[in-house]
Amino acid sequence: MFGVTVRDQMMIAHSFRGDVFGPAQRLHGATYVVDATFRRTALDADDIVVDIGRAAEELHSVLAELTHRNLDDEPAFAGMNTTTEALARVVADRLAERVHAGALGETGRELDGLVVTLHESHIAWASYERSL
Amino acid sequence: MFGVTVRDQMMIAHSFRGDVFGPAQRLHGATYVVDATFRRTALDADDIVVDIGRAAEELHSVLAELTHRNLDDEPAFAGMNTTTEALARVVADRLAERVHAGALGETGRELDGLVVTLHESHIAWASYERSL
Amino acid sequence: MFGVTVRDQMMIAHSFRGDVFGPAQRLHGATYVVDATFRRTALDADDIVVDIGRAAEELHSVLAELTHRNLDDEPAFAGMNTTTEALARVVADRLAERVHAGALGETGRELDGLVVTLHESHIAWASYERSL
Amino acid sequence: MFGVTVRDQMMIAHSFRGDVFGPAQRLHGATYVVDATFRRTALDADDIVVDIGRAAEELHSVLAELTHRNLDDEPAFAGMNTTTEALARVVADRLAERVHAGALGETGRELDGLVVTLHESHIAWASYERSL
Amino acid sequence: MFGVTVRDQMMIAHSFRGDVFGPAQRLHGATYVVDATFRRTALDADDIVVDIGRAAEELHSVLAELTHRNLDDEPAFAGMNTTTEALARVVADRLAERVHAGALGETGRELDGLVVTLHESHIAWASYERSL
Amino acid sequence: MFGVTVRDQMMIAHSFRGDVFGPAQRLHGATYVVDATFRRTALDADDIVVDIGRAAEELHSVLAELTHRNLDDEPAFAGMNTTTEALARVVADRLAERVHAGALGETGRELDGLVVTLHESHIAWASYERSL
């Protein structure tokens, strides 16, 4: 199995609802350093998993919809806590939609899976893995 | 599949028995930077894998039983080499016991698995993965 | 010249005023991974620059006054942009006050200088250096 | 499942054929920081996955055949693009050959799998995973 | 003293002349992860050292003139070895020219100094520091 | 001013004397990831600060005298605490002796200074800087 990973980042504000979150119930924020890994069992005719330039652009586009925002104000996240793990799924699912829509070309349709990891600090990160 | 990881560290002395270890048969030591990853197929009602604060506390408690010690003197490790990979299992198994005992709450009982990685330097690390 | 550094972090929300900031004029947030370096020309009688445990506690206390907050609401920052470089000075100055008040003990009073670095992502960071 | 990883590096020149590569069709180069992970379900009698010293030597030997070269001139790579993901497989397959030939000793023959990751920069890396 | 750093990268081929370089006399290559630090004694009216967006763009432009090239073919480097330390000066001097030409605006003219660090691997890097 | 840095590591056991050290008064250990930076105002005729291969060898030789040992048993450290900062000076001073003895060649004698940084974990490190 092959994997190719690209890294980018976003900087957001948010707050959480629920006693489990303690002081994180207050409005605060985070930088998420985001790794997106594209998986595939065989390389294509160019000896690549995916066009890494397009993969980086798609990840950047997905993060551009989130960065420099207060996620508490985003209708897409109404009724949910935008925890690191929940956002990892959001990023992965939005990337998957783009792959399915052909954003990575025909060869991108042969991808098997996707892992998205969001690093919230030097001591904590979360990931979400899904098939494609 | 979701994963949430917390990082902590311990600083121990030890020595190894066996020709394969060369100069590491002498008493020496290591800083282990320790990553514990908690895995789960679905998020709970708070949109989390685990209460990350409690997860960090449990990892810290497990490492507190090991850090600032000479592991050669610990009865728990009599007859075994406390290699990086062996200690990864020790940390994982002790975390698993705590999870099973309810240390991460009821929601923690729904965790599927655990991975513990011990970094011994910038060029070597080891991990142990188990189900919960 | 000796230096000892401890690392901690804070997660804050804020916005900036001024066209130069582009989309960062919107409310957003950041994780700042914070390094505080304590400098001294000679070691003390214990062969240390500073009691590293107390240094880490003081850094943690300074960051506890900032983390999990919307800095736009903090009176201390009225009329200024809480940029990464400006916050590096805030953290350094607050640490310096504590050192001068004796928080690191008598030996801490012999420190020569302080550098605080705030990492806002994997591709950007800022620092502030001052004497003590 | 246990894993032990060692890190080393190589510095190569190469060029790619295919419009998908854009400016990387020109002769350029890369440092690959290479992680090789050896996997095994149980530890051996010495409580190790593999003799880490020998594992590091084998990885170093594999990389010595590639580093400080223009890969465009290597007959082994005629007709293929030496992309990061393709080189990850090359390194993994060459390590696997050595393991099968006994380079890691009898205990090395009990390894279950191998993962090789090549980091080409702080924002991109690729990996290849195979059984042994 | 304040400093703001941005990170980017370039991937080049080159060879060295001189026995001291051993196998690096052959054509090979490197990824250079490049950190550019802008220094200044006081913040400007916006509470910044420099417009970080423009600083990142200028660094990217300087690296765009070098990346995906064989530096042995560049007239600018005739008669010199493009070592990591020599390239650090090249990048710093080219950034300084841009700063002096006003690329970072009027406020950029008040910068005091510049440090450029090129990381060639996880175990080696070089830097060049100059005034502005 | 130019700087070239090489990284290596050592794994030692030790204990500290003095109440300030708390549990670190017990025998424990550490991995020190060690960075040695060689500084010089001008490059030599080969466009280098120092022969990086020889610099790495000298650092490795200095660390080989310390690694895989219990520093409490080393006569060289009798009567001192082998703290991270104290060991940074030991490594720097031993490197300086080698430079002065010609270990880095005639060109090495033109070095201006040396910085040695010892990383004891992901959250703490110390450095010592001296002239040559």
Image (tube, coloured by chain):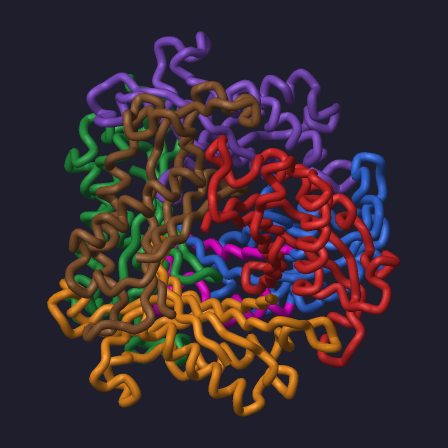
Chain colours: A orange, B brown, C green, D red, E blue, F purple
Residue D44: image x %, image y %? Answer: 50, 36
Depicted F40 relative to depicted E118: above or below? above
Residue C126 found in image quarter: bottom left
Q: Residue furthest left?
A: A19
> Going 41% across and 11% down the picture, which residue do you hit?
F73
Q: Quadrant of the N terminus of chain C?
A: top left
From the viewer's side, name the closer residue of B28 and E107. Answer: B28
From the viewer's side, name the closer residue of F74 and B93. Answer: B93
Residue B27: image x %, image y %? Answer: 43, 20
Residue E130 appears anywhere in the view: no
Q: Is residue A85 magenta?
A: no
Residue C116: image x %, image y %? Answer: 35, 48
Residue C105: image x %, image y %? Answer: 18, 29
Q: Is residue E56 magenta?
A: yes
> Going 62% across and 51% down the picture, which residue do you hit?
D34
Depicted D125 relative to depicted F71: above or below? below
Left or right: residue E116 versus residue B89 is: right
Q: Quadrant of the C terminus of chain C?
A: top left
> Going 78% across and 78% down the picture, which residue do you hit?
D18
From the viewer's side, name the closer residue of E57 and B6. Answer: B6
Q: Which residues are magenta?
A: E32-61
Residue C71 appears anywhere in the view: yes
> Going 81% across and 38% down the picture, which residue do you hit?
E22
From the viewer's side, name the closer residue of D47 and B68. Answer: D47
Left or right: residue C63 versus residue F102 is: left
Number of numbered labels in the structure image: 0
